[in-house]
Image (spheres, grey):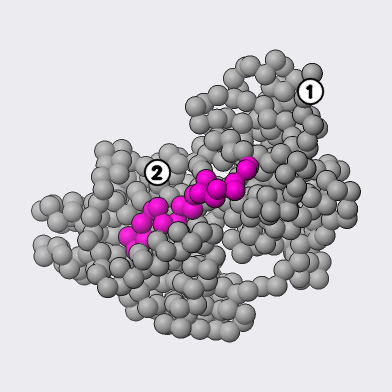
Amino acid sequence: MNTVTRPRILVVGAGFAGVECVRRLERKLNTDEADVTLVTPFSYQLYLPLLPQVASGVLTPQSIAVSLRRSKKYRTRIIPGGAIGVDIKAKVCVIRTINDEIVNEPYDYIVLSPGSITRTFDIPGLTDHAFGMKTLAEAAYIRDHVITQLDLADASDDPAEKASRLQFVVVGGGYAGTETAACLQKLTHAAVKRYPRIDPGLIKWHLIDIAPKLMPELGDKLGKSAQEILTKRGIDISLGVSIAKAGPEEVTFTDGRVVPTRTLIWTAGVVASPLIATLGAETIRGRLAVTADMNLPGHDGVFALGDSGAVPDEAKGGDGAICPPTAQHAMRQGKVVADNVIATLRNQPMKPYVHKDLGLVVDLGGKDAVSKPLGIELRGLPAQVVARGYHWSALRTGVAKVRVATNWTLNALAGDDFVRTGFQARKPATLKDFEYTDSYLSPEQVRDRIEGDGTQEP
C-alpha cells in the first residue's frame, strides 16, 4: 500500500546547481507541500574554482568544502551515495549508497545536476599516469605529490631522475588548467629556496593545449596578458599541442617532443556525468536536450541543468547557443529550476532561464590575475581583488568565508611550510582512481532492475 501523500522531489548532485536548487526549495515550499531528497556521495558542496589554491597550499581542503548539514533549519533528506541510473518512465532513480547497497528511489519530480567527469581521449597511458583536478582528494594529493618530487629530487644523485622529477606538465589551457599551472608554479618557485641541493633552473612547468589561444573566453587582450604573465614566470606554454602518449617517467607531445616527467596533470575539459546516458533521452554534446525552462521535453517533472543540461542561452537570441557549464550559470539555474518545480507543483506557468553575464575572473597566484567584471578588463592587483572578492562572496556560509579569508591572510603574511601529509603516499592516485565511470548502468540494466525484484546487483 502506498502511504506517500506528499509529492517527492529528488535532487541529484550537491554541486552549485543542486545546492542552490535545494536551498530555494526549502525557503519557498510550505512544510507539508513536498518532500525533498538530495543524493550526493559527500555531505558538502565543493567550491571547485578554488581547487588550484588547495593544490598549491594557499587554502586548506576544509575551507572550500562547505557543509550541507551546518544549517539548523535543513530539512532535506540526504542519501549518501551516487545515482547510477534513472528510469524516467517508471520515475525511479537507482542509487548505489556509500555502503555499496543498490536501492531504488521513486520520485515525482527529479532535478538532474550530477556534475561532470574529466574528459579524456584514447591516449595511450593517459588514465594510468595522469592526475586529475576535479575533486578535493585529487587537489590534496597533487600538493603532496609535487612536494614529494622536490624531496626525491633533492635526495637523488642521478641527473636523469632529477630532471624528470623537476619537470611538470599541465594539459588544458582553460581556467582550471591555467590556474593550476600558475598556482603550482608559485608553490615550487617558493619551495625550491628551501632545497639548497636543487638548482632552481631545473624546475620547469609546461602548460599545453590543443586550442590556438589560452582561455579564449577572456578575449584577445586579456588572454594575451595572462600568457605574458605566465611566460615571464618561466612557464613554457605550447598551443596547438596535446599529448600523444604518457608513461610513468616521460610524456610525448603531439609535436614529437619527449618531456621527462613524473607529473602529468590533465584538465582538458569535462563531459556530463555518465548518469545522463542511462536515461536514453536526446542529448547535445552529452548534455540532456532541455527547453529554456530546463524541462526535458515529453517528460513532465524531469529537469536538468548545470553540466548535465544543454540549457538554451536565451541571452544570445535563441540562435542555438547553449549555456556553458560554469559555476555562474549553475548557481543561477539552480534557483530558476527550483521555482519551476514549485510552479509545476502548483499548476502555475514555468519561466525560462535568462541571464546577464557578470564577467570572468582568473587568479594566477600571488598578485597576478586577470579579470573581466561586467566587461571591464583588469590586470594585476585590481584584478586579483575582484577575483578573490567574487569567490569570497560566492561561498555559501559565513564559516567558509572566515576560513578562506583567514587562509589568504595567513598565506600572504607567513607563506607556506611546504609540508606534505603523506596522503596515499604509497599508492598512486591517477584519473582512473577518482572517477568511478564503470559504476553506471545502461538504460537496459536500469529497466531490468526496476522491472525485476529490485534485489539483483548490476
Q: How many marks?
A: 2
Q: Earlier in the sequence, mark 1 or mark 2?
A: 1
Residue 223 within the magenta-colored segment of the rendering? no
Residue 100 seen: yes
C-alpha gap between disc 1 and disc 2: 46 Å
How packed mark 2 is, by other alpha carbons closer than 10 Å (few <14, some 14-19, many 20 or more), is: many
Residue identifier under label 1: 2
Residue 86: x and y in percent read 70, 34
Question: Is residue 385 shown above or below 308?
Answer: below
Quarter of the image that includes the C terminus: top right
Amino acid at the residue labelled 2: Thr
Residue 5: x and y in percent read 79, 31
Residue 79: x and y in percent read 58, 35
Residue 177 seen: no
Quarter of the image that includes the N terminus: top right
Foreground of the two, 216 or 84: 84
Which numbered disc covers residue 262?
Answer: none
Question: Is residue 13 shown above or below 208?
Answer: above
What residue is rendered at 18% in x and 54% in y?
Answer: 151
What residue is rendered at 62% in x and 81% in y?
Answer: 375
Question: Is residue 162 shown above or below 421?
Answer: below
Question: Is residue 455 shown above or below 34?
Answer: above
Lateral position of residue 37 relative to residue 152, left or right: right
Lateral position of residue 211 relative to residue 5, left or right: left
Residue 64 within the magenta-colored segment of the rendering? yes
Residue identifier under label 2: 430
Amino acid at the residue labelled 1: Asn
Foreground of the two, 114 or 119: 114
Q: Could you say whether the residue bearing mark 1 is in a helix, strand or loop? A: loop
What residue is rendered at 60% in x and 75% in y?
Answer: 359
Give, as a single range, the part of the protein colored magenta. 56-76
